[in-house]
Image (tube, rainbow, N blue to C red):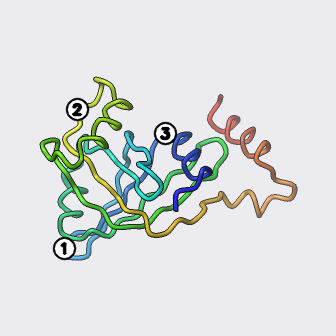
Amino acid sequence: MLTIEVKQSIDESVLCWLATVDSDGFPNCSPKEIFTYYGDKHLIVANIASPNSVSNIQANANVCVSFVHVFKQKGFKLKGQAIYADPTDEDYKEPLELLQSIAGTAFPIQGVILIEVSSVERVIAPGYYLVDGATEESQIESAKRTYGV
């Protein structure tokens, strides 16, 4: 499910956006800074300050996560089922340690959001198919100009 290409995109992305739904059907979408893959079927996300996301996952396990490389303007959208584990749950010690190795001491991780991925879709900026001759290199240069890099 999580191919080398998807894993590389996860490694290259600085933020992901986690979409959840509460028990009344209202959506919530919030940025997550500490995330990575766990094996070939799971994405793990650190709960740093995510009370709404955690509450929603406990009410409705269906989630969607997207991430895009800011310069390449390409990424992926993953859908799946999430569970939440706090740091005392021994079954999730390994994913927690993996997230902690990314976070270092800067972020206090309160728990792990473990997503079993059921579908993967590419996300590609419209410029790739609307601008004649657009390439990854031209998109990167355009993004760098936009961001003043």
Task: Say which amino acid is labelled 1.
Answer: Ser
Task: Say which amino acid is labelled 3.
Answer: Val
Q: Position of residue 129 (x, y in %)?
A: 76, 63
User: Could you say whether the residue bearing mark 1 is in a helix, strand or loop?
Assistant: loop
Left or right: residue 147 versus residue 18 is: right
Of label 1 and label 2, which has the lower sequence position? 1
Left or right: residue 35 versus residue 12 is: left
Instruction: Tally the numbered discs.
Output: 3
Q: Position of residue 37 (x, y in %)?
A: 44, 48
Q: Which mark is residue 83?
A: none
Question: Crowding near pointer 3: few (<14 within 10 Å), some, many (20+)?
Answer: some
What residue sits right under mark 2 in the picture?
A: 108
> Marks 3 and 1, Cα distance to the nearest angstrom?
30 Å
User: Could you say whether the residue bearing mark 3 is in a helix, strand or loop?
Assistant: loop
Q: Residue at image x 70%, y 35%?
A: 145
Quarter-of-image position of residue 36? top left
Question: Crowding near pointer 1: few (<14 within 10 Å), some, many (20+)?
Answer: few
Depth check: give the residue in front, 52 or 12: 12
What residue sits right under mark 3 in the picture?
A: 14
Q: Position of residue 41 (x, y in %)?
A: 44, 59
> Marks 3 and 2, Cα distance to the nearest angstrom?
18 Å
Task: Say which amino acid is labelled 2.
Answer: Pro
Q: Residue furthest right?
A: 133
Q: Which mark is residue 23?
A: 1
User: Could you say whether the residue bearing mark 2 is in a helix, strand or loop?
Assistant: loop
Q: Are marks 3 and 1 in contact (CB under 8 Å)?
A: no
